[in-house]
Image (cartoon, grey):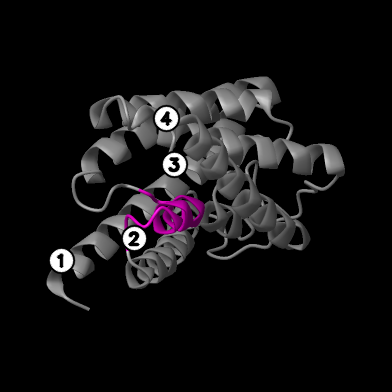
Amino acid sequence: MDRELAKKCLAEFAGTCFLVMIVMGSGIMGENMSSDQLAVLIANSIAVGTGLTALIWIFISISGAHFNPAVSLVIYLKREITLQHCVYFILFQFAGGFLGVVLANTMFGLDVIQIAQTDRGGLHIYLGEFIATFGLLMTILGVRKLSLIALAPAVGLYIASAIWFTSSTSFANPAVTLARGFSDTFTGIHPEFIFVYIALQAAGAVMAMLFMNFLQNE
């Protein structure tokens, strides 16, 4: 691995790690402070939307700030990165996500590794996850044509809203999905649902790419 690729992979690792800490940590903090699920969801969506915006601004000039294997897959399919870059990005995203959940659990005095028990199955929830990921990639591919500076707040705003309008609460990220299987807290997901979520995320991302390619004449 050359120096430039190593820097990009480190950016993807750090960005995904912090994204998972934001997702998991805000959920745990919300649960610690309130028994009201509405209040916890409000806190979680605000933290995730604003935190993701900041992370994208920090790392977009280094790696493109994917922090998401579904995003890296689409960027590869659009021939904007090589297969080598795509594979390394995805590996570092999953590794960063795992470290993120370990750190989140540790910060709040929980077992370092837990197995989530939250049931997130059902066709209606799977549809929600497909739509969440489709919308995320639609946002990314559409807004970047307008402005890279605008991309960060657009993605943050979309994810904050998708946490509310989708039945799955918008995981929309295979690395984050896998990580959330290792914390039995507000944002966790039982491992038996992880593969289905990841498959739907990949499908939603590719379908969004095809849709936007058509609209943008690519």
Q: Which residues are magenta?
A: 66-81
Q: Gap between marks 1 and 4, in whole Å?
A: 27 Å
Q: Residues within 10 Å of mark 1 (few under 14, many from 20)?
A: few
Point 43% across, 69% down: residue? 91
Q: Please, what secondary structure does the residue beneath circle 3 have?
A: helix
Task: Report the residue marked by disc 4.
Answer: 142
Q: Gap between marks 3 and 4, in whole Å?
A: 25 Å
Q: Gap between marks 2 and 1, in whole Å?
A: 14 Å
Query: Is 13 included in the stretch rendered in magenta?
Result: no
Q: Amino acid at mark 4?
A: Gly
Pair 2/4: label in front: 4
Q: Amino acid at mark 2?
A: Phe
Task: Report the residue marked by disc 3.
Answer: 22
Q: Of the numbered discs in the image, which one, if any, rests on residue 4?
A: 1
Numbered circles on residues, count: 4
Q: Please, what secondary structure does the residue beneath circle 1 have?
A: helix
Pair 3/4: label in front: 4
Point 68% across, 62% down: residue? 115
Q: Please, what secondary structure does the residue beneath circle 2 have?
A: helix
